[in-house]
Amino acid sequence: MGILMVGGKPYEYQSEFIRQYVAQGKVRGQAELISRLLARRFGSLSSDVQKRIDQATIDELGAIAERLLTAQTLQQALDPS
C-alpha cells in the first residue's frame, strides 16, 4: 500500500499523512462496495450492520467480501464460521 505508478515506475509516498489518507480511502471504498453488494443480495442493511461495516478493518472487509460469495444469509456473510 502507498505505492503509485508514475510514468510506469513505482513511486512510494514520502508523507505518512498521504500514506494514511490513501489507506483510509481504500478502506472507505471497499466498505462502500461491500455495503452495496450486501444490500443487493440480502436487502436493506440495518444501521447496526452498516456501522459494523463502516468500522471494519481492511482485513475484516476482505473476509466479508470472500464470505459474501457463498453466504446464504447476511449473518453468514458477516460472521466467520
Image (cartoon, helix red, strand yellow):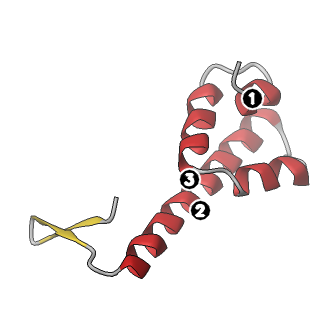
The 10 Å Cα crowd at callout 3, few under 14, some 14 to 19, many 20 or more, is some
Residue drawn at (89%, 50%) of the image: 48
The one of 8 and 59 positioned closer to us in this rendering: 59
Point 71% across, 57% down: residue: 54
Question: Label 3, on which residue?
Answer: 30
**Label 2 near label 3: C-beta < 8 Å?**
yes
> Of discs 1 and 3, which sits in the foreground?
1
Residue marked by disc 1: 79
Position in image of residue 31 (x %, y %) = 63, 53
Task: Determine whether 56 is above or below 15 in the image.
Answer: above
Give how far apart the Cα atoms at labels 1 and 2 are: 20 Å
Earlier-in-chain disc, 1 versus 3: 3
Quick check: 8 above or below 65? below
Residues at circles 1 and 3 in contact by the CB criterion of under 8 Å: no
Percent coordinates x, y for residue 33 in the rendering: 60, 51
Q: Which of the two residues, 41 or 67, is positioned nearer the viewer here?
A: 67
Q: Secondary structure at mark 1?
A: loop
Residue position marked by numbered label 2 in the rendering: 28
Query: Which residue is at a point 33% across and 81% down the rendered structure image?
Result: 15
Q: Amino acid at mark 1?
A: Asp
Hey, what amino acid is under mark 3? Answer: Gln
Q: Give, as a three-letter code, the residue at label 2.
A: Arg
Q: CA distance from mark 3 to mark 2?
A: 5 Å
Which residue is most to the front? 16
